[in-house]
Image: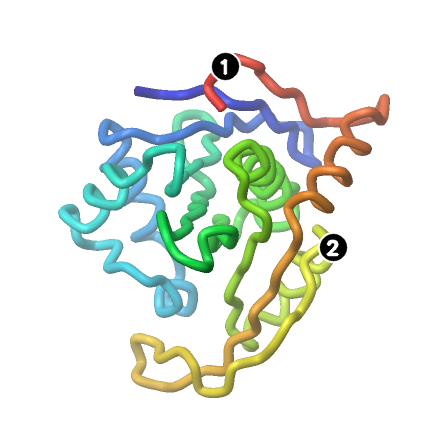
Amino acid sequence: MEHKLAVLTLHDGREVQIRQPGLEDLEKLMAFLTRLPDDIKQYLRYNVHNHEILSRRLKEVDSDNHWRLVAELDGRIIADGTLDRDAYGWTRHIAELRVIVDDEFEGLGVRAGLCEEFVILAQQAGVERMQMQVPVERTDLIPILEGLGFRQELVRKLYAKGLDGKLHDVVFMTNDVDRMWKRLEDSMHELDTNFTRWFSGNY
């Protein structure tokens, strides 16, 4: 079932729909993931060319411990994001955030829009901290996340192995959900906000 969440106006004036995808979006989502550049694909945690794996990931979405949102423009997915946490255990208060944006739309506000939606979902689900793992090579991404309020917590040396077999250092970036929520609430009160939410009871 499709859940309409928000409409985001990009910096260039175009409007993007942010929503929760379903199994009916499998082919559309796969088309987005498979057209990603190879230097981005090697950091993905799942084989995006495998229908079964992607289908299983879509079925995992339960709006309790697993969330997924896509940004869509003119029927084409231009960004994909997931938020996952353990159902039990001492790290249940922490959720792992991943957001991938089509290079064509990087820097237009899509990443920030998706992150803001995930902040709302996380706050309502009782998630206390959001965490992202960023390869140190992504020097373009780290400043963007810092601009959203994420902080570099630590660097794990030779932590990730890419599809090329090379080991990479990874930066762990974290942000407290309450702090992000307060920041988002403040921005919503600005008269010049370009983020329009559809309160449809789907959160």
N-terminal-most mark, 1 or 2: 2
| Residue sticking out furthest to the left | 52
Q: Residue at x 58, y 46 (%)?
A: 111
- 73 versus 147 height, above or below: above
Q: Residue at x 44, y 36 (%)?
A: 69
Query: Where does residue 196 sit, x and y in percent of width and height?
Result: 66, 21
Helix or strand or loop: what does disc 2 sit on?
helix
Q: Which residue is mark 2?
A: 147
Q: Which residue is mark 1?
A: 201
- Location of the N terminus by quadrant is top left
Q: CA distance from mark 1 to mark 2?
A: 29 Å
Asked whether residue 135 appears in the rendered view, the answer is yes
Q: Amino acid at mark 1?
A: Gly
Query: Where does residue 144 sit, x and y in percent of width and height?
Result: 68, 57
Q: Is residue 51 left or right of residue 88?
A: left
Q: Residue at x 55, y 32 (%)?
A: 124
Q: How many marks?
A: 2
Q: Is residue 32 left or right of residue 152?
A: left
- 87 versus 187 height, above or below: below
Graded by Cα atoms within 10 Å as few (under 14), some (14 to 19) or many (20 or more), the crowding at tag 2 reads: few
Q: Amino acid at mark 2?
A: Gly
Q: Is residue 29 left or right of residue 192?
A: left
Helix or strand or loop: what does disc 1 sit on?
loop
